[in-house]
Image: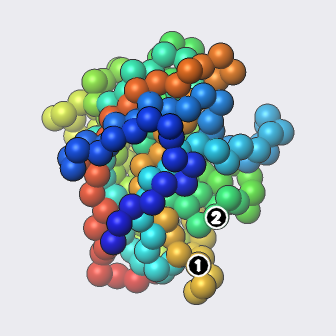
Amino acid sequence: MSFTWFNEPKKWSNNGSTISVHTDGKTDFWRKTHYGFERDNGHFYYRSFPGEQALTATVNVRGKYTILYDQGGLMLRIDEKNWIKCGVEYVEGNQFASVVVTVNGWSDWSVVPISSPDVLKLRVKREKEAVHIEYAEGENGEFKMMRLAYFPIPDKSQSIMVGIMCASPGEDTQGFEIDFDQLNIIENQEKA
């Protein structure tokens, strides 16, 4: 099963083990909460799975974050009103491990301070209506739980999309360079 772009960036490449992206400016995924605006123009490179499929996704993320809210990581998505993004987000000059959960058109955001590692490893496991999100700092870091989130099981007619995401929401940004290594999505035996 091949990958597909949602909002394909102008510059990107895939050498078989690393997906490299230069994000387009003024891109983001967000719905309503606090800021009042909605954006659904971030970059998302994904595969589709049956809506009830249990799965585990992993990736290593390396970015040259420089502008407020530069971000990249993993995403699970049903539609524009139901999705989860997790990874690195650059806030006030520091990297944070970040999760945004959007359900029924409303986003929430949580962050964990990290020590600006060269690489952030992510692991996301979906079982039924639960998504377990873990992160590890550096090549040899051990995974720690970042979030256990509710995520709806889609209708039988809908699929779940899983892959990498990145965005540059800043108003004065020309985007940034980000690499995704060892992206792996495994279908688990149990069904949702």
Q: Which residue is mark 1?
A: 158
Q: Residues within 10 Å of mark 1 (few under 14, many from 20)?
A: some
Residue 86 seen in the current view: no
Badge 2: how crowded within 10 Å, few (<14), some, or many (20+)? some
- Mark 2 residue element: strand
Asked which secondary structure carries label 1, the reply is: loop
Numbered mark located on residue 7 in the image:
none
Q: Amino acid at mark 2?
A: Asp
Give the residue at the far right of this rendering. 36
Above/below status of 128 relative to 120: below
Q: Position of residue 46 (x, y in %)?
A: 44, 59
Quick check: 149 left or right of 183? right
Q: Amino acid at mark 1?
A: Gln
Colour setting: rainbow
Residue, disc 2:
79
Answer yes or no: do the residues labelled 1 and 2 have beta carbons within 8 Å? yes
Give the residue displayed 51% in from the left and 40% down from the top: 9
Whole-percent x and y of residue 67?
A: 55, 17
The foreground one among 34 and 37 is 37
Position above or below: 160 against 61: below
